[in-house]
Amino acid sequence: MAEIHELSAVRLSVALRGGDLSAREAAAHFLARIESKNRLLGAFVTVTAEQAMAEAAAADARYARLRRQPGRGTEPLSGRDGTDLPLLHGMPLAFKDLTDVAGVVTTHGSAALDHKPALTDGALVSVLKSAGVISLGKTQVPEFGLTAYSENRIAPPSRNPHAPSRSSGGSSGGSAAAVAAGLLPFAPGTDGGGSVRIPAAACGLVGLKPGRGVVASGESSGDPARLVVAGPLARSAEDAALLLDALAPQQGTSYLEEVRQEPARLRIGVTLDSPWSTTFPFTVEEEALDALQAGTDLLEKAGHSVMEASVRYDNRYPDAFTTAWTAAVGTARISPHREALLAPLTRAFRRRAQQRSAAKLNESLAFLRQFQRDTVAQYGQWDLMLMPALAQTPRPVGWFTGAAHGDDRWPAAEWAGDADGDYRKQCEFAPWSSLVNVCGLPAITIPVHWTDGRPGQGLPMGIQLVGPMGSEGLLLQVAVQLGF
């Protein structure tokens, strides 16, 4: 029999629902994995073992009460109709340290904030706890979730389980590292510019960014361009579909049922065009092109037509996106005497955001709405759009900041402080991510290639598929069709 952490999330859920495994057994197993592996990986900032075991005991008690009801047989207890067990009964997971969990400190990855326990659960946490999950703790993030790497000044950097000298990406980097290393069966992330898809690609996972408005609990009132949405990080598309069913329940057919259906033959446009190219000219590494070719081959073998697509992007995009992306950090409540504790990139973004006029922000938001209309119209010629997930292999820890993160030396004694260089590197690393958030479209990353040629060997590299509004199920279907 496979060990608990080797089970897919779907199989683990069946075992919990059928009584083959108790919620306490599952929680204890994953907590032991975290205790054993986290020191190397830095995936977790806070582990809430006592709270998790108490929640698991309550879940087991609920299961026992339901099983004792007259007329119950031995069949698994249903969660679909809302009358029995919740959908994710007993499933262990964790939340990014940007999200409030009642009684647990939310650091936002920042040394400039007071670290106090949250009084209540955030919306995303409330939704998933109602679905039956057991929270094991809080995972590593960059400061305020701003970057494509999960390093900060309060805890060890999150490392890639496939190569611990490499980053696990960001901003959901700790969650991605935990799922890839078997410390969690799956995890929710939030994606405002690639923050689910970038770490999923870096860690060899399936990462789904739903379309705007699909997961209301993942959105933020401090997000003027409505960039951020919550989505699943998982080892397979079926596991991602199960988590999406809890995040965004559908009437009728569930996402998990939908992904088991065969998609129609699709016209797929493949492109390397990016709105960052003019401002930050970048080179697509050979490994990224190999992943794109591998993805193309798999799609064509599955019967889809993949054809080159030329997309025109307005070169005003980088300035407008950056203005919208950094607006919230300008209004964050940070005491003036603690601003020196911010990372150089955060400090620079905050200063510039505070110096911008409201008119400048409104102008940028209006531009991004027009950019959305123009881009969606061009994408409309195709059923899906295909591009590499990342332009480069997962970067070394400390590469973006110029910091040296050794195993026993954190936070780095000195960060280089080159905010503009840091930001440029991120945009060159993930040049196809943020535009999808601006357009509000769903997108999925799929780990189709490994740099040493065999699954699990070397570094993972993936593709990104972008679909029209409402195509979350289709994107997951295609991932399953391709074997993921």
Image: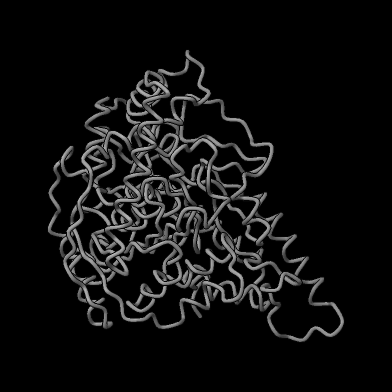
Which of these two is toward me, 379 or 66? Answer: 379
Task: Find residue 282 and report its horizontal and vertical position in percent.
Answer: 15, 45
Task: Find residue 358 and report its horizontal and vertical position in percent.
Answer: 43, 24
Task: Find residue 115 and report its horizontal and vertical position in percent.
Answer: 57, 30
Q: Is residue 76 above or below residue 189?
A: below
Q: Is residue 8 above or below residue 370?
A: below
In the image, is 371 to the left or to the right of 38? left
Q: Is residue 353 above or below residue 13?
A: above
Q: How is the image coloured?
A: one colour
Q: Quadrant location of residue 406?
A: top left
Which of these two is toward me, 57 or 194? Answer: 194
Residue drawn at x 41%, y 52% is 440
Q: Is residue 43 above or below residue 476?
A: above
Residue drawn at x 49%, y 35% is 108
Q: Looking at the figure, which quarter contains the C terminus?
A: bottom left
In the image, is 243 to the left or to the right of 144? right
Q: Quadrant location of residue 458?
A: bottom left
